[in-house]
Amino acid sequence: MSWRYRFIFFILVAAYGVIVSRLFYWQVIKAEELSTLASSQYREEIKLLPKRGEVKTSDGFPLAASRVSYLAYANPKLIRDKKKIADTLSMYLSIDKASVSALLSLDRFWVPIKTTIDSKTKDIIDSFSLPGIGFEEQFSRIYPEASMAAHLLGFVGKDSSGQDKGYFGLEGYYDRLLRGKKDYIVEIQDALGRPILARMSKNLRGADGNNLKLSIDRSIQFMVEKKLKIGIEKYNASSGMVGIMNPKTGSIIALVSLPSFSPSNYQDYEENLYKNPFISNTYEPGSTFKPLVMSAALDASLVTPQTKCNTCEGSVFIGGFEIHTWNEKYFKDINMVDVIRRSDNTGMVFVAQKLGVDRMISYLEKFGIGQLTDIDLQGEVAPSLKSKEQWYPVDLATAGFGQGISLTPLELLDAFSAIANKGKRMRPYIVDFIEGADGKTVKVTPKTLSSPISEKTAKVMTEILVNAVNKGEAQWTRLKGYRIAGKTGTASIPVEGHYDPEETLASFIGFAPADDPKFSMLVILDKPTTSPYGSETAAPIFFEIARDILNYYGIPPSE
Amino acid sequence: MKRHSFVITFALFIIVFLSIVQVVVSNRLSTDGIGLGKIEDEIRFYKAQNSLLSEELFLASSLNNIASKATNLGFIENKSQFVLKTSLPFALKP
């Protein structure tokens, strides 16, 4: 072989070696970097923003919905005339000029300027084609009924990473269902940044959040908020709440607590207003608790409606404490029907002592006292019942008339509703349907939690409660023509080891119509000053609301 | 020999034909991207408009708004109710 052939062969081998080594460099050593560079040139990741689900009332009207809004951001490194841009932005975004200038002076590539900008403002700013200023689409919450049912809804705030998160109420309880699933699509683009149809990647569906359809009746909720507000002002109470449920299913028809807050401007309110006191605050229920104790004694056949109290001729002394009636009136041999009608504390001490600690605890547990009702709202509490060893004779006596025992208004309403539902206690719930982003709907089925009393006992207790409404302290305000079962309550408020001598918690609990209940309702006024009694404050509100609901449901008077 | 040249010619024809098809399809796809972009812009626009209109509709049909308008128009709450107590309050036959 001549040297020429060898030379050519050597050149070819060398060239081959150079090519191989260069390919090795590109495909192995620099592979990742080049791949990323290429990707950035032809593909763009587009975030799929999940739309937070709507919260609708039973008529399908959204109490909370999502709207498209924009986040304005800046890349200060691309902005030369910062003063001019700061002037424009401050004028249209209603931010002071100094704040915008400070943001534009930052040594960053991305600075958020303002969130929840509406599309009109965005279009105006867009028309100026400001260099280094951009917009990012986002969703923000709107509340078409303003602060209606705010305690039920809760609100949407931010978590530690700046992402939307629901707090309190339904927004908190159903946050994962409502928020939807974050995802992105990859779009392949040509050299000019235009999308190429053939290479559009998968378009994910079902990323939006689920909608919640509530059992809340918007008209009743609106009416109750109005009536309660008027009631609080009229009786000069510090706060008030009303809960209405369907005793046959446990579905909540309306739930109102005042004072309230606006979910869209929750930051402007004190944090203690965020909690829903109907499920998060405990109180001593007073006389509204008596129907539970009486029905327990009736169910255990320890008393009958005609049983006479042989210890009711005067105040009762137990464990060094003297127990009085609310009006210092005593009735010798008063029967059980009148014990409830007159709301006689000594009569209820007689009943509680007949029950004894074991049966009292057993029946209270069956009524769900001391247990969470498992309502689908964030923030429910339930203080446990004392153990048997911690019950002193005076505790048993005072529990008979609803003092010395703490529960939430919801616990009481749920337990009381068992009397209206033939002795069956239902799980209270707010969400009736869950509507998936794929259009599938799941119905929430009512659930029986326990059967604390028999149907027969429930019927007897209902008659005792109808009698209490027709002939008791609140008869002046009752709805004539309707059979309504109910009980007043005027509870003392415990303060640092004793009861406040002046302030009370006035309440009324009941259901209607008594023979085929469509709703049960609890009205509570905290510290009314025009009168301390439930019969003169909470009862009129109860009957005002009951009248409107009966009209709304088209239920005529039966008598 | 004749058969071989036919196969080669046919193969070349197929190659040229498929190349032309690829060019045409690629060309169409690249321009369809512009159309796609426009469609996506339109979808975004209509979605935003839909969202705005829904918001206006919700606000207009909220009970708060209706109640305040009713009050301004002079409507008041009717506290009396009229109930027909008997099942047949009118004559069955004239």
Image (cartoon, rainbow, N blue to C red):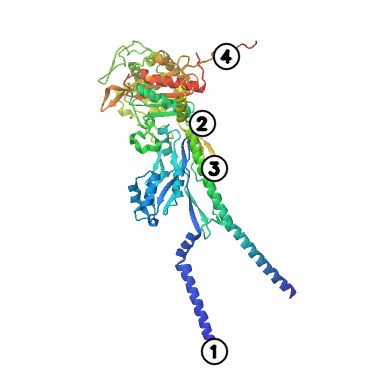
| Residue corresponding to mark 2 | A59
- SS class, disc 4: loop
SS under mark 1:
loop
Task: Find residue A195 and report its horizontal and vertical position in percent.
Answer: 54, 55
Q: Residue at x 29, y 15 (%)?
A: A315
Asked if labels 4 and 1 touch by Cβ distance under 8 angstroms, the answer is: no
Q: Sequence-wise, which precedes: disc 3 or disc 1? A: 1
SS at mark 3 in the image: loop
Kindly check if marks 2 and 1 are in contact, taking CB atoms under 8 A apart as contact: no
User: Do tags 3 and 1 sit on the same chain?
Assistant: yes
Real-space Cα distance between discs 2 and 1?
Answer: 98 Å
Residue that label 4 marks = B87
Residue A290: give its label: none
Chain at tag 1: A
Q: Which residue is mark 3?
A: A438
Vertical arrangement, residue A476 with respect to residue A128, above or below = above
Q: Position of residue A147 (x, y in %)?
A: 41, 33
In-front residue for pair A39/B46 = B46
